[in-house]
Amino acid sequence: MGLSAIKTSPWLWVTIIVAAFGNICFGSVRMIGIPLVVKVVMNSDVKGLGLLNTTAAIAGMASAVILGSVKRLRWRGISYYAAHIIAGLGLVWMSRQSTVAGALPAMVLLGLAPPLFGLIWTGTLQQMIPRDKLGRVISLDSLGSFALCPSALGWLAGMATWWAHQACFWPQALSLSGLAW
């Protein structure tokens, strides 16, 4: 039932595929890459990581409040994919930093993107999917988006160990931005 609702809209199934790769790329860097770079490259401790994560959280709250106050969101598709590009730019910026202070603007970009993904996507699903199929579609979306995350975490951890720590951001940034483009 849910799969048939997804198949009827190319925008839905393409976006679910893009979101699956986006979650893999974005989530793995947020969980492994940033703490590793803060410790190894920036020579900082948990206070530096806490400052960066707090910056991202404040930016995320601001983007959610701003987007939540919009009466009618036009160009949902463009806005959704622009959020992926914002996340990719944040990852590129983060990969070039060697201090916590220099990474703060990157964390603003990385904090802005997830609420934009979530709010735009949730609103779109609620408008495009019949109420009786919404739960099934959201289940399929979540399965597609999060099923591959554990393998991405292992891949990124291995890459960060053998490669330069900051270089682990580039494949994720390119795939986020490239998929959105």
Image (cartoon, rainbow, N blue to C red):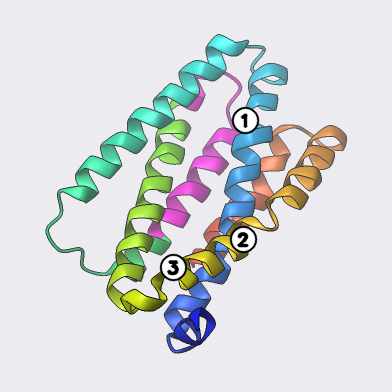
Q: Position of residue 108 (x, y in %)?
A: 40, 33
* Amino acid marked by disc 3: Gly
Mark nearer the viewer, 2 or 3: 3
The percent position of residue 166, horizontal first and vertical second, equals 69, 34
Q: Which residue is mark 1?
A: 34
Per the image, the residue denoted by label 3 is 135
In this view, the residue in front, 146 or 157, is 146
Q: Which mark is residue 21?
A: 2
User: Is 109 placed above or below 131 here?
Assistant: above
Residue range highlighted in magenta: 82-103
Identity, as a three-letter code, of the amino acid under mark 2: Phe
Q: Is residue 12 left or right of residue 142?
A: left
The span from disc 3 to disc 1 (Cα, nearest Å) is 34 Å
Q: CA distance from mark 1 to mark 2?
A: 19 Å
Q: Are circles 2 and 3 on residues that touch, CB within 8 Å?
A: no
Residue 28's place in the image compared with 143, above or below, is above
Seen in the picture, residue 31 relative to 7 is either above or below; the reply is: above
**Residue at horizontal 58%, vertical 27%?**
97
Res 161 quadrant in image: top right
Q: Nearer the viewer, mark 3 or mark 1?
A: 3
Give the spatial CA distance, label 2 vs label 3. Answer: 22 Å
Residue 20 as seen in the image, left or right of residue 157? left
Horizontal relation, residue 128 to residue 103: left or right: left
**Magenta stretch secondary structure, dominant:** helix
Q: Residue furthest left?
A: 71
Q: Is residue 156 left or right of residue 112?
A: right
On the image, which quarter does residue 143 sit in?
A: bottom right
Label placed on residue 24: none
Front tag of 1 and 2: 2
Please name the amino acid that badge 1 sits on.
Ile
